[in-house]
Amino acid sequence: MPSNAQAISLCVFSSFATYAILRVLHRSEPSSSSSSSSSSSSSSSSSSSSSSAKSVKSLIENRRSVFPKQYNGDIIPKATMKDILDTARWAPNHKLNEPWKFIVFSGSGKKKLGQFLADEYKATAGDSFNQGKYTKKLKNSEVTSHIVALICKSSNKTVELEDIASTSMAVQNIHLYCTAVGVGMYWSSGSVYANGKKNDRAVTNSESVREFLKIEEEEFLIGWGYFGLVEGGEVGGKGVRKEMEETGRIRWVE
Ligand SMILES: Cc1cc2nc3c(=O)[nH]c(=O)nc-3n(C[C@H](O)[C@H](O)[C@H](O)COP(=O)(O)O)c2cc1C
């Protein structure tokens, strides 16, 4: 199985998918009242596309992980969750195999999951077990509206990495849209250890987790999505990142 880091690094491409979606949406919208100060009736397509580009960039830059400690315990309506999860299918994916799959926990299902995750932590943490952490896990699931198992279904080893990349892009679509509609979200690796080994914690596919989720052979968990509402509804904000070229993340060959 490819490393989590590989999947994460490919996630960034979803920005482009989202850009395309919002651009299309913007074009199909009737010109709204929020246009800029100039009162021109002939709003040129180039100025509208540049304001669209700015808002998409701003959405991408201001998307933030929003954690359970920030949630107020309110429940996100099911219709809103459906709308949010629907954005996943517009992620690009190899040969349209649409590898993403989500198991959505809410209500008593979420309570069972929260208890299960806390107990799994207890069962696998060994000497590092910390009662406070255990209690926090239970509390986190209580204040969270929905917890979603983020699953990749890939039956073909040769495209498995690409399938994980696409599933990650699907999650980025979800995350960006959450920011746009004022829903808090973050991707959690989960603090349970695969095979009972502390260093194997990154991708949480222990037998017990797989059994709990009832996932098939060719499916694997790539993380958990936590969704919740925050007081005032403001979920975006300034983030911390280094400049691309400063860190040698781009090499131009011209
Ligand atoms: C694959 C993946 C796994 C993550 N796992 C965790 C986690 O287990 N715990 C956590 O606090 N944050 C986790 N995060 C969220 C990161 O902490 C967060 O994205 C990072 O701090 C940058 O913050 P931002 O999303 O607000 O830009 C994860 C994010 C990704 C994409």
Image: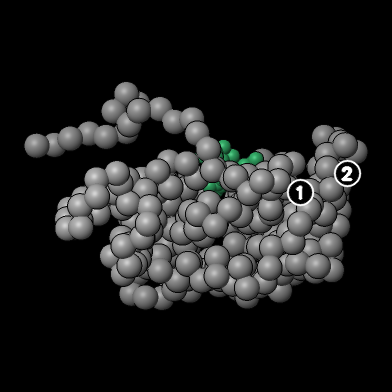
Q: Position of residue 197 (x, y in %)?
A: 72, 45
Query: What residue is rendered at 84% in x and 62% in y?
Result: 111
Q: Tell me where residue 204 sits by quadrant.
A: bottom right
The numbered dot on residue 114 is none
Q: How many marks?
A: 2
Question: Looking at the image, can residue 136 be seen?
Answer: yes
Q: How far apart in space, not on screen, are marks 1 and 2 (Cα)?
A: 18 Å
| Position above or below: 219 against 225 | below
Residue that label 2 marks: 135
Q: Is residue 133 left or right of residue 203?
A: right
SS for dot 1: loop
Q: Quadrant of ligand 1?
A: top right
User: Residue 128: x percent and y percent?
Assistant: 82, 34
Residue furthest out toward the left: 254
Q: Nearer the viewer, residue 80 or 15?
A: 80
Q: Position of residue 133 (x, y in %)?
A: 83, 39
